[in-house]
Image (cartoon, grey):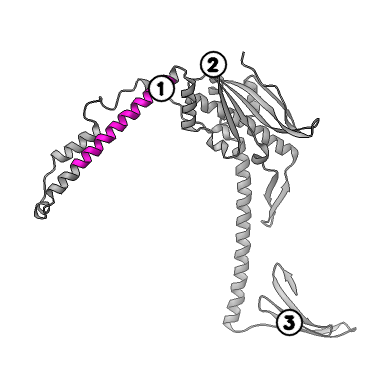
Amino acid sequence: MNVSTRGIGASFGGKGLRYSVNSRGQTRTTVGIPGTGMYYTKSRTYHSSAYQRRNQLLKEQRQAQKLEEIKQNQLEVELFKNKCEMIKSIHKECETPINWEEIRNSPPPFHYGQIGPNERNAVDLLENYKPGFFSKLFNQVEKKRQALQEKIRKAHDEDLQTHREWKELVQTADLVLRGDHETYLKVIEEYAPFDDISEFGSGFEIFTCEEDSGILEVEFEVKSESVIPNEVKSLTKTGKLSVKPMTKTMYYDLQQDYVCSCAIRIARDLFALLPLHTVLVHAADNQLNPATGYNEQVTLLSVKFDRTTLNNLNVDLIDCSDSMTNFPHNMKFLKTKGLQRVERIQLS
């Protein structure tokens, strides 16, 4: 029995006489005289159109399977490259800035106690309703009027809900501008700006500053092992998938870029959502302590962002790791060991 990339075949017989057949429908008979080196081979060729067509279809099937395998391999490589690119470009995404002052000063959708816009439209429909011939003929006039009355009631409720939402938003804007920490946390929970980073497995904890409402402190749990790939995927010249262990330098470069990119993203989102002037970000991860033999959580990056400097950066073109030099920060990076433990920046 022979199994190869071209198919499956079987041979029967001994040294003097052998008969072979393969999955492509080809047969071969070999007759020889042992010890002489003389032999005679006859291959069978099918002449009917059905057999010839079958062989052609099997050949096309093998080619299609090979193309499908190459396509799947290309997709695997593209997914790998895309993940690496995402890891380094998280800082380019950001929430749309909120103008809380404009919201606080926004006029109501209508004055409470007066008829709202939705109800006004519904009333106009009822007042302008003129029964048609068939409505009168089939006694549908009263039913139609009742339906329009129901629309007025629903429109009234919708207007009240709109007014309540406006009032709540204005109150929220007022509390935000007053520096209410509880409202800060509610806004962050409502907008959930870090959801896409959380999909990588990373976690966050946010702290307020009692002395200054314009400062927030964020602890960011990196979880490198679940984020940074440890294998490199590429295509060979024949389209096969090549999977090799990622080098330490490449792994640690990705780790540093990911940590710094997330730190910038966290600060950008918080500046967009809240009237802050300073955001402290501390990135932490588990590392082996050689003295104890156990993993423990250590700070890998501590950076103090200010709104003005961060807003002046061209975030689409910066190298997120190099950009840390624009801010007070603690970061120690070794090419073959990655980010090392550092002290956290303290608020003065």
Residue behind mark 2? 210
* SS for callout 1: helix
* SS for callout 3: strand
Residue behind mark 1? 173
189 lies left or right of 299: left
Residue under the image location 60 percent in, 56 percent down: 71
Q: Using the image, determine if residue 202 lies above or below residue 37.
A: above
Using the image as rendered, state which of residue 173 and residue 49 is in the foreground: 173
Percent x, y of residue 241 = 68, 54
Residue under the image location 53 percent in, 27 percent down: 268
Read off the magenta span: 149-175
In front of the other: label 2 or label 1? 2
Q: Using the image, determine if residue 136 lies above or below residue 286.
A: below
Circle nearer the N terminus (2, 1): 1
Three-letter code, disc 1:
Ala
* Quadrant in the picture for the C terminus: top right
Residue behind mark 3? 28
